[in-house]
Amino acid sequence: MLQIEELKVVVGGKTILNNVNMEIPKGETHILFGPNGSGKTSLMMTIMGFSGYNVTRGKIIFKGEDITDMPINERALLGIGVSFQRPPTISGLKTREIVEICDVDRSTNVEELAKQLNFTDLLYRDVNHNFSGGEIKRSELLQLMAQQPDLVLLDEPESGVDLESIVLIGDAINSLLNRGVRCPQERPHKEIISGRTKSALVITHTGHILDYITADRGQVLYNGILCCSRNAREILKWIREYGYEECVRCSNEIMPLI
């Protein structure tokens, strides 16, 4: 689904990402861990094609097509969707209208989707105007559910979200990725990927989202460098016990490949 080759990204004259290699197969959900300022959001913005993120080396290949120089709108139409950590307020545009814009095929029942996210009462308010953290996240997911992208990019979906909203958000993410709903106490289990068509890259700082979604793989981005790729819960365990710096230093020696 997504292949990144030796990617170097410069922002404002400063190297933010260096020699990043990543593969996300069709139907897989990958978790991207990393401390604040490590380059996680910059990687997401580069994949989506935002200006200011200058690729000076490497390639981004999506569904077999080189999209390194493709504009944002064409990437979206090709099947990439994004949920921002801090999306802007858009005065004069109702949330229902932006959801309808995201529904390119005009096949979405907006009210039914809104019910799934307990969002019906907010459809006719301006986008993100006076929304709580949880309402903003649910608005972002509602737009993605209307768009139905093949690759979903989620930037810290658990950030600033209360307990009730995180359950709804977790269920919505699992539904969007055709994974069903899982219990927070469940241990991750091997699933048959062949029946799933959507892939995801989920950015997290705390790892809390793993209590509500199922991931196939975890990766750590530290100081702009992709350090390791292993079982997501094993990575989270080591980060919690040793911190990012120590985890990155010894991960290749201590943690077995899974």
Image (cartoon, rainbow, N blue to C red):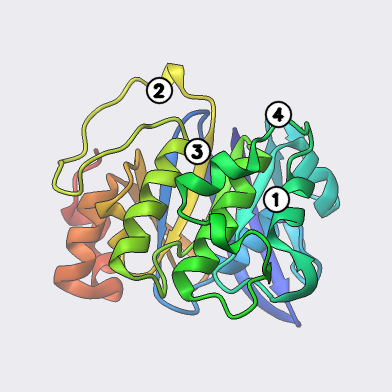
Q: Is residue 195 above or below residue 83?
A: above
Mark 4: which amino acid?
Answer: Gly
Which residue is at the front of the view, 227 or 43?
Answer: 43
Residue 189, how many percent across, how many down? 21, 32
Image quadrant containing the C terminus: top left
Mark 2: which amino acid?
Answer: Ile
Residue 152, how many percent across, how many down? 57, 45
Which callout, 1 or 4, points at the residue further toward the start of the chain?
4
Q: CA gap, disc 3 to disc 2?
A: 15 Å
Mark 3 touches mark 2? (CB < 8 Å): no
Residue 82, how many percent across, how many down? 63, 54
**Nearer the observer, disc 4 or disc 2?**
2
Q: Residue at x 51, y 63 (%)?
A: 137
Crowd around label 2: few <14 · some 14–19 · many ≥20 (10 Å): some
Mark 1 touches mark 4? (CB < 8 Å): no
**Nearer the observer, disc 4 or disc 3?**
3
Crowd around label 1: few <14 · some 14–19 · many ≥20 (10 Å): many
Mark 1: which amino acid?
Answer: Val
Mark 4 touches mark 2? (CB < 8 Å): no
Q: Is residue 214 above or below residue 209?
A: above
Q: CA gap, disc 1 to disc 3?
A: 15 Å
| In this picture, residue 156 sits left or right of residue 97 | left
Q: CA gap, disc 4 to disc 2?
A: 19 Å
- What residue sits right under mark 4 in the picture? 64
- What residue sits right under mark 1 in the picture? 99
Which callout, 1 or 3, points at the residue further toward the start of the chain?
1
Residue 193 tag number: 2
